[in-house]
Image: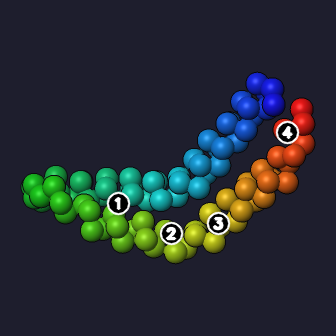
Amino acid sequence: MNTDLVMTLGAETLKTTALVASPMLIAALAIGLIISVLQAITQINEATLTFIPKMFVVAAVLLVAGSWMLDVLTVFSTGLFENIADWVRQ
């Protein structure tokens, strides 16, 4: 294994991680922002008010995009396992 291969694998791993995690993180960010604006408008200062809606939204996103996320991870893992013998020989 040379350094170029390690850097490429690291970059692909980070890209795949960001791709899989981004739908849930963006949804949690959006609902948190909406709840925070509503709290500012109504002047309700309850810190725990955002947790339940975030959990429901993240669960809904996981249900909707879960098969796509699993497909992305499966393709990435399959590519790793198929090419590991060639990479070790280099």
In what element is the residue under mark 3? helix
Which residue in the structure is indicated by mark 3? 70
Crowding around mark 4 (Cα neighbors within 10 Å: few <14, some 14 to 19, many 20+) is few
Where disc 1 sits, the SS reads helix
The image position of residue 75, as x and y in percent, is 76, 59
Q: Nearer the viewer, residue 21 or 80?
A: 80
Q: Crowding at label 2, few (<14), some or many (≥20) Cα neighbours within 10 Å?
A: some
Q: Is residue 37 left or right of residue 61?
A: left
* Residue for badge 2: 62
Q: Secondary structure at mark 4?
A: helix
Closer to us: mark 1 or mark 4?
A: 4
- Which sits in the foreground, 57 or 12? 12
* Residue with the mark numbered 1: 31
Identified by mark 2, the residue type is Leu
Badges 1 and 4: C-beta atoms under 8 Å apart?
Answer: no
- Mark 1 to mark 4 CA distance (whole Å): 43 Å
Distance (Cα) linking label 4 and label 2: 34 Å
**Separation of residues labelled 1 and 3 (CA atoms):** 24 Å
Going from the N terminus, do you reach mark 1 or mark 3 first? 1
- Looking at the image, which residue is at 50% across and 69% down? 62
Please name the amino acid that badge 4 sits on: Trp
Label 2: state its secondary structure. Answer: helix
Whole-number angstrom distance, CA of label 3 to CA of label 2: 10 Å
Instruction: Give, as a three-letter code, the residue at label 1.
Output: Ile
In front of the other: label 1 or label 3? 3
Question: Label for residue 17?
Answer: none
Q: Earlier in the sequence, mark 4 or mark 2?
A: 2
* Left or right: residue 43 compared with residue 16: left
Residue on which the image places disc 4: 87
